[in-house]
Image: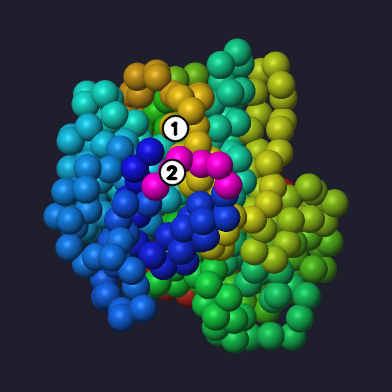
Amino acid sequence: MKVALLGHGTVGSGVEKILNGMKDTDIDICGILVRNIRPDMDERYTDDVEKIFGNKPECIIECLGGDEPAYSYVKRALESGIDVISANKKMLSRHMDLFDTAKSNNTKLLFEASCGGGIPWLINIRRIKRNDEIVSIKGIINGTCNYLLSRLFNEDISFADALKNAQELGYAEADPSDDICGYDSRYKLTLSIYEAFDKIMDYSSIPCFGIDNITDKDIQYAKDNNMVIKLIASADLKGNNISAFVMPCFIRKDDIFASVSSNNNILMSDSKYLGKAYFAGQGAGSLPTGHAIVQDLLDLKNNEMCLNESEADKIDNDISRLGVFYIRHQNIAAFKDYIAEKISDDSFISRRCSFKGISDIIDNNHDEKMFIGEINR
Ligand code: HSE
């Protein structure tokens, strides 16, 4: 089987390493697209995408990251009868039309590695769905944020120093605000919603709050109440609607999500018959992500795929979900109808209320340093 790799960074080099170490496969890497050719690279490496397409691969593995040129190359491949495996959550979730492109060209677009890194998540929700109905999904799906929060809770370290370490360890995105502002989790949630519920949701309709503004004060409130803070992405089915959020959550220390530390991820699906099932492990990194990609490749080669053949409907996000929220904001008076317990002059715990009401106040009272977290969801 002839495959071509687009990109040879953290993920692409992991894929190559795993394929090189596999015995008895007839997988042939016929081309590797890189930005800059180095003298030590063999003839498979090229900076010319035409050479890649000219080699007529049966499958293209896209590990470029970012929106363009990844989107154009993937679209072209799918339209040319070439199957695609992609780890690119940002590009895929912003271009959900690619799933239609694959269907209408009878090609396959596999993306296990885009969500949860090495954790077999998408394949398992597809399997669960075959004889069950998923009612909610929830996860810690950004390793960088989980690493930062673990260190901030357990050590005397500044946010900036912990982030620098996460970058050195290769966890963070090229632009780390994608991680700390929650955008990366939102991309992954959009793709998980597609698989779990057969719904296409515009990623930008998902309320998204990150940990970029977290302070010692927020952490101390959690500690004083025997809780930790985790960045949680979640989606609940409500009739035909979905209610999806990315938001920090204050969770009890004995919650299973609290025990997942450092750069690890955890994903949970709740379905009518199986109930809650948890999947945890390495959500990022060269070899774990490479492993998920090679799994997709083997499924493709052996024609052993468990594919989602359902038609997906486009759907709006329903943000009326009820919850209790911790809010730190310079103008808490604006939230007066929602305050259940004042913590300080700039922070409070809300009464149980719809997020929609809180969201309107946040939109009308801008505070770029605000921090919000849901309590004990
Ligand atoms: N920046 C991402 C993370 C990489 O920290 O989870 C894996 O998608």
Q: Is residue 24 magenta?
A: yes
Q: Which residues are magenta?
A: 23-28
Which quarter of the figure has residue 5? bottom left
Q: Amino acid at mark 1?
A: Lys
**Residue that numbered label 2 is attached to:** 27
Query: Which label lies toward us, 1 or 2?
Result: 2
* Farthest residue, direction top: 131
Q: Position of residue 377 (x, y in %)?
A: 68, 45
Answer left or right for 76 relative to 212.
left
Answer above or below: position of 347 versus 76: below
Q: Position of residue 340 (x, y in %)?
A: 67, 54
Answer left or right for 81 relative to 260.
left
Q: Residues within 10 Å of mark 2 (few under 14, many from 20)?
A: some
Looking at the image, which residue is at 58% across and 39% down?
121
**Which is nearer the eye, 127 or 184?**
127
In what element is the residue under mark 1? helix
Mark pair 1, 2: CA separation: 9 Å
Answer left or right for 163 relative to 340.
left
Q: Position of residue 38 (x, y in %)?
A: 31, 79
Looking at the image, which residue is at 38% across and 38% down?
1
Tell me, for residue 301, which label it has, or none: 1
* Farthest residue, direction front: 24
Q: Earlier in the sequence, mark 1 or mark 2?
A: 2
Residue 322 visible, this angle: no
In what element is the residue under mark 2? loop
Q: Amino acid at mark 2?
A: Ile
Most frequent secondary structure within the magenta stretch: loop
Ligand 1 within 8 Å, label 1 CB: no
Mark 1 in CB contact with mark 2 (< 8 angstroms): yes
Q: Residues within 10 Å of mark 1 (few under 14, many from 20)?
A: some
